[in-house]
Image (spheres, grey):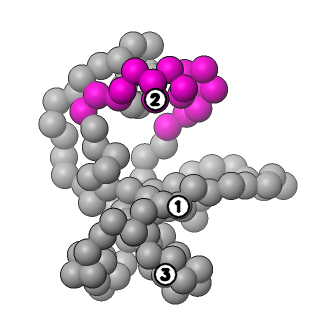
Amino acid sequence: MGSSLAHGAIETMPLGPKSICDGLMARKPGEAPYAAVTTTNVRGLTVEDAAVRSAMKVAFERLKLVLEPSGASSLAALLGGKVDVAGKTVLVVATGGNVSLADFMVHMNNA
């Protein structure tokens, strides 16, 4: 999505580096999501896998939520200071428990 937004048209990207956020690694955005993002002036951010693991751990320990890596990326951006939220009311979409117990434990042990 980021490259498509930067270039003003839907692009297909080559396979990139691996990430634990496999749900966010689509090579090409769909037409409807692209249209929705371009009409609302949303901007994209990147977060490192380590920040996502930390966000998953915070969600589990403090909020009692099990999040899959892709679903924890927005929380990772917030916790990592990637978004200026001072004096603002903030909604963080944190989704998906689509992670196996074994994978979740690996992420928790590496957070």
Q: Would you say 9 lies left or right of 91 here?
A: left
Image location (x, y in percent) of residue 15: 15, 36
Snapshot quadrant of residue 3: top left
SS category of the residue bearing label 1:
loop
Task: Identify the residue position indicated by label 2 in the image.
Answer: 33
> Given contact means CB atoms under 8 Å apart, are the residues at marks 2 and 1 in contact?
no
Mark 3 residue element: helix
Q: Which mark is residue 11?
A: none
Give the residue number, with chain letter if any, for mark 1. Answer: 94
Q: Is residue 81 visible?
A: no
The stretch of residues the image draws in magenta is 27-44
Q: Nearer the viewer, residue 45 or 106?
A: 106
What's the residue type where badge 2 is placed? Answer: Pro
Q: Mark 2, residues whose alpha carbon is within 10 Å: few (<14), some, or many (≥20)?
A: few
Q: Is residue 28 magenta?
A: yes
How far apart are the alpha carbons under marks 2 and 3? 29 Å
Going from the N terminus, do you reach mark 1 or mark 3 first? 3
Compared to residue 33, the image places residue 6 above or below, namely above
Callout 1: 10 Å neighbours few (<14), some, many (20+)?
many
Q: Give the position of the N terminus as an image quadrant.
A: top left
Q: Position of residue 83 (x, y in %)?
A: 63, 50
Which of the image's four quarters has the C terminus? bottom left
Q: Residues within 10 Å of mark 3 (few under 14, many from 20)?
A: some
Type of amino acid at the residue the image marks with label 3 = Phe
Q: Which residue is mark 3?
A: 60
Q: Is residue 27 above or below residue 91?
A: above
